[in-house]
Image: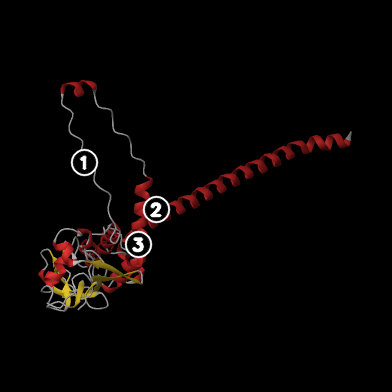
Amino acid sequence: MPAFGLLACLAPVWRALVKQLLLVWEMEKQVLRARVRYAMTGFLYSLLLSVPMNAAENQKAVPPGLIEYVEQVRRLGLPESEVRENARKAGWPDAQVTQALAAVKTAATSAATVPVPPPPPAPVAAAVEEATPAAAPKQPPAVLADDIPAGPEDYRIGAGDVLQINVWDEPKASVSAAVVRPDGRVGMPLIKEVDVLGLTPKQAERRITARLTALIPSADVTVVVSSINSKKIYAIGAVKKEGPIAYTYRMTVLQALSEAGGLNDYAKHKKIYVLRTEQGKEFRLPFDYDAVLKGQRTELNVTLMPNDVIVVPR
């Protein structure tokens, strides 16, 4: 009985103690929640502040003119190594060039991944009452700098040719007579030297435009071959004027003999031949002068190629 009385006396004390412990536990949980909310609020606030600061730093780090230059030369198909070289010559640091290339690539990737919503359907009533407008012509795809196709008949620039390079509305960047050196290069203001050997005039225009874009945005370049000195044929033997003949048009054997002044009195008319070298092999093309003049063997009057040699035996 005394034990039960003692427990009955301590019961209120135990209940008060348990209530106090529960109250302390609830207060601790509230304090912990407040600390977590405060920490999350501070983190989000610092994150929001860092975004415009980083954007401002990036904008300051990459000049807009450099990004515009990179975008233009990418449309022209200039390789990334040449873009870096031209930008470095123009005075832009390598770090800024790298950032500009990355920014342009990211923008192009983002534009390619954004879905284009389909156009809304045209109202039926409007389609009946109004005439349907003509569809806009499709634009051809952009052609890269050196990917312009060249046909077998297209002229290719060679050493010794004289080029007239005109940059529209930029007389100081133009050249009235640029001689192609044996190494295939021509000198120009602003960009120093350009390799044009073996290119067609259209391909040379694209290459020069890509080099000038860093200094002259939207440059319009025209290349004209004003003097052909790299393509020649040769006449030797019993002709009145031996030596090289400028290959300024696709001439035949008979036309080339006329350019050489014709045959002299000692020429063997039926023994004439053309020496031609293709892929390291040399072979002869016979030519009967009298038969061709009479119109009997016209197939022998072939069209000559550069470096052909007409041999007229005596």
Task: Measure how far apart labels 2 and 3 are at the Cα level.
Answer: 27 Å
- Find numbered disc 1 in the image and state the secondary structure of the residue it sits on: loop
Q: Residue at x 27, y 64 (%)?
A: 66
Q: Position of residue 118 (x, y in %)?
A: 32, 34
Viewer-closest of 111 and 42: 111
Tell me if residue 230 comes above or below residue 135 in the rendering. below
Disc number for residue 25: none
Task: Measure how far apart labels 3 and 1 are at the Cα level.
Answer: 32 Å
| Residue that numbered label 3 is attached to | 101
Q: Position of residue 207 (x, y in %)?
A: 25, 65
Q: Position of residue 65 (x, y in %)?
A: 24, 63
Q: Residue furthest right?
A: 1
Say whether residue 265 is left or right of residue 86: left
Q: Amino acid at mark 2?
A: Leu
Disc number for residue 48: 2
Image quarter hosting the N terminus: top right
| Residue that numbered label 1 is attached to | 137
Viewer-closest of 248 and 298: 298
- Find numbered disc 3 in the image and state the secondary structure of the residue it sits on: helix
Residue 21 visible, this angle: yes
Q: Say which quarter of the image contains residue 209.
A: bottom left
Q: Amino acid at mark 1?
A: Pro
Q: Say which quarter of the image contains residue 232.
A: bottom left
Callout in the foreground (3, 1)? 1
Q: Residue at x 42, y 56 (%)?
A: 46
Residues at marks 2 and 1 touching, judged by CB atoms closer than 8 Å: no
Viewer-closest of 149 and 63: 149
Viewer-closest of 307 and 150: 307
Say whether residue 263 is left or right of residue 285: left
